[in-house]
Image (cartoon, rainbow, N blue to C red):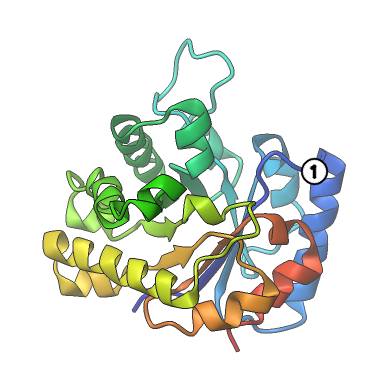
Amino acid sequence: MRKNIVAGNWKMNTTLEEGVELANEINGLLKGKKANCDVVICVPFTHLVAVKGVIDEGVMGLGAENCSEHEKGAYTGEVSAAMVKSTGADHVILGHSERRQYFGENNEQLLAKTKLALANGLTPIFCVGEVLEERENGSFNEVVKGQVEALFSLEPADFAKIIIAYEPVWAIGTGKTATAEQAQDMHAHIRSVIAEKYGKELADNTSILYGGSCKPTNAKELFAKPDVDGGLIGGAALKADSFMGIIEAFD
């Protein structure tokens, strides 16, 4: 049975001290109640070890925001999947629209990253999504299908370990939000693409998160849709109260 998940993506925000304080605050709020979803916070590499020290394992998971497509070696400034795992993290965001857009990450690199993440026992949160031009010219279903299919050389048992996050890129940081109906349509489309390759059972068990300006005010409507299994949260994850407001949308 697929899980409901709320994952925070802090991006390049917070100093180490601020990040530890935020993680501690979220952890404290979660300890006081039973969340009806899994919670993960994905933090900058520099924060992983310290944040791991202040969160409770049974309360939330910890993730990195990226990892290298290389196993190890002369890649100055890169961080490998094995390094991420060694910090105590259990998740990693891969293929975020910002990585695709600003750093030119392509399907081949993202497949290599996904394989290394899985080999090191990390759960990939694999991001897909279309830009405004693709939404407006009607190619968005094909674009997203191609991004999902980049992983289709994986064995079913490996694909089953992946969380998909759909990001309408035109709705990230713009204040625009896909309607709940648009989100549902794309999530159902993604699930059907997975089902064509791996079968209905695996597709039905895949968690698909929505990642595009999700806030406490719209989370309940989004999460009520049958194929929306939670959110990958950006700005609203940087304040404990707004992040908790989204988690509490699963009542």
Q: Position of residue 230 (x, y in %)?
A: 51, 71
Q: Is residue 117 visible?
A: yes
x 17%, y 44%: residue: 153
Q: Indicate whether 39 appears above or below 142.
A: below
Residue in the foreground of this view, choosing between 185 and 105: 185
Give the secondary structure at mark 1. Answer: loop
Which quadrant holds residue 50? top right
Q: Position of residue 181 (x, y in %)?
A: 42, 77
x 79%, y 74%: residue: 29
Quarter that holds the N terminus: bottom left
Pointer 1: what residue?
14
Residue in the foreground of this view, choosing between 240 and 160: 240
For the image shown, how many numbered marks are present on the structure? Answer: 1
Residue in the foreground of this view, choosing between 27 and 7: 7
Q: Indicate whether 236 appears above or below 200.
A: above
x 82%, y 39%: residue: 15
Q: Position of residue 192 (x, y in %)?
A: 21, 68
Which quadrant holds residue 136? bottom left
Count neighbours of disc 1 (C-alpha within 10 A) and say few if under 14, some if 14 to 19, many if 20 or more: some
